[in-house]
Image: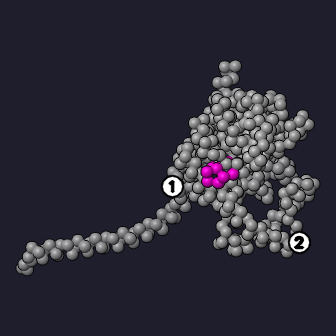
Amino acid sequence: MICISHSESKLFTMKHILTVITLFSLALVSCTGQQEKETEEQLMERARQIHERVITLDTHADISTSNFTEEQNYTMNLNTQVNLPKMEEGGLDIAWFIVYTGQDTLSEEGYAKAYENADDKFKAIHRLTEEYAPDRIELALTSDDVRRINSEGKKVAMIGVENAYPVGTDLSHIQEFYERGARYMSLSHNGHSQFSDSNTGTRDSTWLHNGLSDLGREAVAEMNKWGIMIDLSHPSKEANIETMKLSKAPVIASHSSARALNDVSRNLTDEELLLLKENGGVVQTVAFKSYLNTEKNNKYGEAADNIIEEVAAEMDFEMLGWGEVRQLPQDEIEAYFAKRQEVIDAATPRIEEEVHPVAPPVDVTDLVDHIDYMVDLIGIDHVGISSDFDGGGGVYGWEDASETFNVTLELVKRGYTEEEISKLWSGNLLRVLDDVQAVATKIQAES
């Protein structure tokens, strides 16, 4: 028998404890390293499963009616950021196709021309859903329609009107647009309309109405009556504040981000965002590079443009300014953009190799930075997502509908739950649509 003193026994015990702690720590470090690797793989898989389960909705995709013909339409993988093959590849369930009209003179001639443009785009969207691809995409008018169409495995089309200018001064067109499928409309675009001042007035502090016109106030009431969501993404701050105070229903900003993070007039101020929360509305964070981070985008754009110009010269192609492009005949415009895309595709490998390391592009992380900010400010129930595809939108990682999963992946990385991601992608916007339609039903019943 070996005798051990009390002090020796205590020392022996402490040595064993330290040994056990050390071994446990080493094992924990080893397991943690293995767990990190497993977690990264599991995160990707979890994000994919979430992306498949939630209904993904993009509130702003511009269209050209030249892509809605029997010979050329969205059943084909066209050189557009949105079409059915890209939606199917990227898991984008709902695209709001936009009846957009640029601002022109406030005259009967201008209104008539604008109405023809809007009419053409309404008809184009209906051709896609009713003639060209009814088995793959269907027009939704309510949130119930959305869920039914989605459950049938089809894509969903919805219609937004960007600029109420085509309404002219005949407010009965608002009901007409509703009956043709429009479920949101903005009172102006880039230029003051007969209804509302535009955000563009900040350039020279020149205003037409100092907010809404009398006709604009009537239009707010008429949109409430028929169940059209009012879109704040282009009017001035003063017009937006007045609209939110007047509207009996929640409003939306179909494609805007946070001005506090990037001070451009197309983004919403904190004051507007807080009023939007009080109104019960939702802001659809837009993936538009210069709205998300102008400085970063300019730095990247300058470096990338230099390479594109070099490649264009090598391909004997002249890059034109937007003003010059608009002056071309329609068939030449389409040919120009097709060739321009060839140049950009040829330049892309050099841009990624030479520019990205020193001047990275605006990407999905910048988009989600704006989502984070607005969620922190006004809450998860009042924020959504939009692209402005085929209207200037798109960021690195979400350049077209085929890359939609990358947005979900970044949200998962940031710690958003599936319930929160579902709200951001579609739940909040569809809730506002339900609320707006409920208000309309009540107004119509009372009248």
What predominant SS class does the magenta segment belong to?
A: loop
Nearer to us in this view, 276 or 174: 276
Q: Residue at x 69, y 51 (%)?
A: 264
Secondary element at image label 2 = loop
Give the quadrant of residue 239.
top right
Q: Give the range drawn in magenta.
A: 256-264
Mark 1 sits on what residue? Answer: 415
Residue 128: % across, % down: 79, 45
Left or right relative to 24: residue 426 = right
Q: Residues within 10 Å of mark 1 (few under 14, many from 20)?
A: few
Residue 286: % across, % down: 67, 51
Nearer to us in this view, 181 or 339: 339
**Residue 15 in the image: above or below residue 60:** below
The answer to whether any part of residue 295 appears in the image is: yes
Measure the alpha-carbon separation of dots 2 and 1: 49 Å
Nearer to us in this view, 317 or 270: 270
Q: Which residue is drawn at 51% across and 64% down?
A: 40
Residue 441: % across, % down: 66, 26
In the image, residue 111 lies in the stretch drawn in magenta: no
Residue at the limit of the structure toward the top, as seen here: 447
Q: Which residue is drawn at 82% across and 45% down?
A: 102
Q: How is the image coloured?
A: one colour
Q: What residue type is labelled 2?
A: Asp
**Residue 297 in the image: above or below residue 120:** below
For marks 2 and 1 on the same chain, the one whose residue lies earlier in the sequence: 2
Nearer to us in this view, 56 or 262: 262
Give the quadrant of residue 173.
top right
Say whether marks 2 and 1 touch (CB < 8 Å): no
Mark 2 sits on what residue? Answer: 316
Secondary element at image label 1 = loop
The answer to whether any part of residue 125 appears in the image is: no
Q: Residues within 10 Å of mark 2 (few under 14, many from 20)?
A: few
